[in-house]
Image (spheres, grey):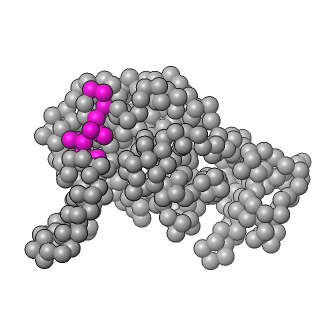
Amino acid sequence: MTTRLRDEDFSRLVDLRAMQGFNAAQVVVGIPPETVPEDVDAASPVGPAWRRSGEFNPRYLQHARERILAMNRGGLGAIVYGAWGPQINWLGVERMCDWWREVISATDDLDVFYCLSGESNLQLSLKDLIPNQRAAGVLTRLERLIERLPFLRRAASRLPQRPRLIEYRCRAWSRVLESAVKLTDKPFIIHPNPLDEGFSCVNNSYLLAANSAQTGHTYQARPRLHRLPMTHHAAGDPAGRGFINLEPWYEGIHGHFFGQDQLYAFWVSMLAGAVSFCYGAQGIWNVGDGSFLAHWGGQTFSQAFALDTPRLIGKSHALFTAIAGKKAEVTLQEKGDVLVSIQQSSEKGSITFVPEVSDAAAIPAGKVWLPMRGEFIERLPAHGQVVIISQPGNN
């Protein structure tokens, strides 16, 4: 919604994602993460969403509505993030309830569903207090000064610590959720920190439409990609709600997680029982120019826009949805934390993902799909990722 994404680039991105097979996109209607209301990088063409004093900007909401309407016309629904975790400390609970009332009023007749908060338990830090997020050098010097001066370290130690922060945030966002769901029939979810889950972020999780996670942008998070949805389903939910990883590895973040990692994340998530898959890319989520939020990586918007991976994910998703059954059983082969294969079986047959063919002792018979090419091939390759489709009559 900010001026960092020009109208023409916004339209190109909507058209591209719809063509690639996506049906929704996550958008922040409010102050974006890692900025503050005073930061030029948080502003739309008509100014920021609101000011730290609590003054809302109705022209911003109209601008956001117009962009979401353009998304809908282009074939994308909008997953509307109304705020980010620390911002409830800035506005307060009651004013945050008021903000959500304005967001819903401006968007509820459109093709949307709502995300209460991004990273609801995110810790307040110095960067939440300085007005220009490009001033990375200032932030670094302040952090070093705190480490050197005992009285500043003592002052910092008096800030809310994580257990108390989580307890406060849980109560605060629960109150906002209770207020917001009364205003709409559209579903609500919440976006957690890494190592948290959506259902644990509020006291009234029965008001959420799905459980959710952010698995984290590290290779150590690899097992969580399939284990979290499996754990969610094993625990059982009387309401039958699904699981969504709202933030798996972003392509290009920290200079990592390109094509093979993205296809790995898709297949293990979906075969483990996730109800959808979210793709992100460094340069797209932050509308990057290579320097803005460069601590996450230098990939630019133009570079991310040109990536072919989303097209391949779209092709894999079309294959998955055409074959996956409703009542599926999941079977794993693992060596420690290394996934050898994951298989989903149903009345329609089975789908097996093998991350590395040479690591698997046995591979089921069936049609062979190469995720990195987005097509079926005649023979099993000696190395690399494969998906095996086993259905009656195709072996």
Q: What stretch is highlighted in magenta?
A: 35-46
Left or right: 227 in relation to 290: right
- Magenta residue check for 41: yes
Left or right: 283 in relation to 258: left
Classify residue 45 by image quadrant.
Answer: top left
Q: Measuring 49% from the left and 55% from the top, which residue is drawn there?
A: 253
Tell me which secondary structure the magenta stretch mostly adopts. loop
Residue 46: image location, x then y, percent: 27, 26
Name the residue nearer the viewer: 372 or 214: 372
Quadrant showing the N terminus: top left
Name the residue nearer the viewer: 103 or 349: 103
Residue farthest left in this picture: 151
- Whether residue 330 is visible to the viewer of this picture, yes or no, is yes
Residue 89: image location, x then y, percent: 19, 51
Q: Measuring 46% from the left and 51% from the top, which residue is drawn there?
A: 298
- Whether residue 165 is visible to the viewer of this picture, yes or no, is no
- Magenta residue check for 247: no
Residue 197: image location, x then y, percent: 41, 59
Name the residue nearer the viewer: 319 or 350: 319
Left or right: 380 in relation to 137: right
